[in-house]
Image (cartoon, coloured by chain):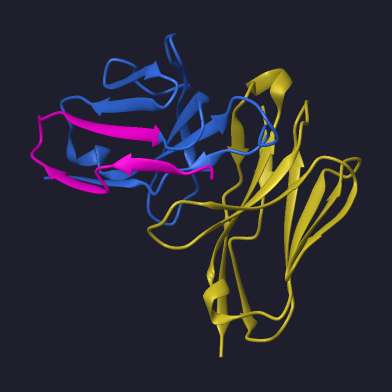
Chain colours: A blue, B yellow
Amino acid sequence: GAVVSQHPSWVICKSGTSVKIECRSLDFQATTMFWYRQFPKQSLMLMATSNEGSKATYEQGVEKDKFLINHASLTLSTLTVTSAHPEDSSFYICSARDGGGKRYNEQFFGPGTRLTVL
Amino acid sequence: GQNIDQPTEMTATEGAIVQINCTYQTSGFNGLFWYQQHAGEAPTFLSYNVLDGLEEKGRFSSFLSRSKGYSYLLLKELQMKDSASYLCAVRDEINYGQNFVFGPGTRLSVLP
């Protein structure tokens, strides 16, 4: 149980295009999902917190108009990188928190999406 | 704000024991987590401590002292596959809600 999937696992795009990354909780309802970015040899940096049915909360320094987050259902959150540039190339990881039951405290991570912007 | 510190890199020998330390300074505290992350992969959950003391789970154990703002992850009988980054994360619901704040991670290299 507690599986989180991400799609795509990797993507290469041209500068100026937009890329959508999906995060799904497969066997539980995720009231809260988190989006992280990780640069090589660095730790995870939280970008935003997404709650189902409401606007995402962005961390300081993260442009909400550039990184669009939609959490339309209890099992799906999407991150859209708009007008991507080479500096947006990174490893994007989502995580999900189970809304109830015994698995209250953990975050379950997706396998990550490696974005390369040419 | 929050400050979480871990050693950047550690090296140990196969079969040995290694202790990875994590210190934190947070105004609120609702638990400390350890995650393992292999290169290019997502983190996987290892342990959770919210009360002082030692939590043992197979070859891995995690210790917490809330008064000292200190935790460690102990890995026994090291195997080559244990070469990975180990991330310490603190949850502070008062200031950060459901978020975790991650430390810089410790890259562990296990040598034959």
* A85 on left or right of B26: left
Residue A36 screen position, x and y as percent = 43, 36
Residue at screen point 27% across, 34% down: A21
Closer-to-camera residue (B50/A98): A98
Residue B32 screen position, x and y as percent = 73, 42
Q: Quadrant of residue A99?
A: top right
Residue at screen point 42% across, 27% down: A75
In this rendering, is residue A43 above or below A35? below
Residue B58 screen position, x and y as percent = 74, 68
Residue B27 screen position, x and y as percent = 78, 26
| Residue projecting furthest to the bottom | B112
* A62 on left or right of B80: left
Instruction: Based on the picture, tell me whether residue A83 belongs to the magenta stretch.
Output: no
- Total labels: the figure holds 0
Closer-to-camera residue (B89/A99): A99
Q: Quadrant of residue B17?
A: bottom right
* B86 on left or right of A35: right
Q: Quadrant of residue A88?
A: top left
In this rendering, is residue B84 above or below A41? below
Q: Quadrant of the C terminus of chain B?
A: bottom right
In this rendering, is residue B79 above or below B65? below
In this rendering, is residue A63 above or below B18? above
Q: Quadrant of the N terminus of chain B?
A: top right
Residue at screen point 63% across, 86% down: B14
Give, as a single range, the part of the protein colored magenta. Answer: A1-24
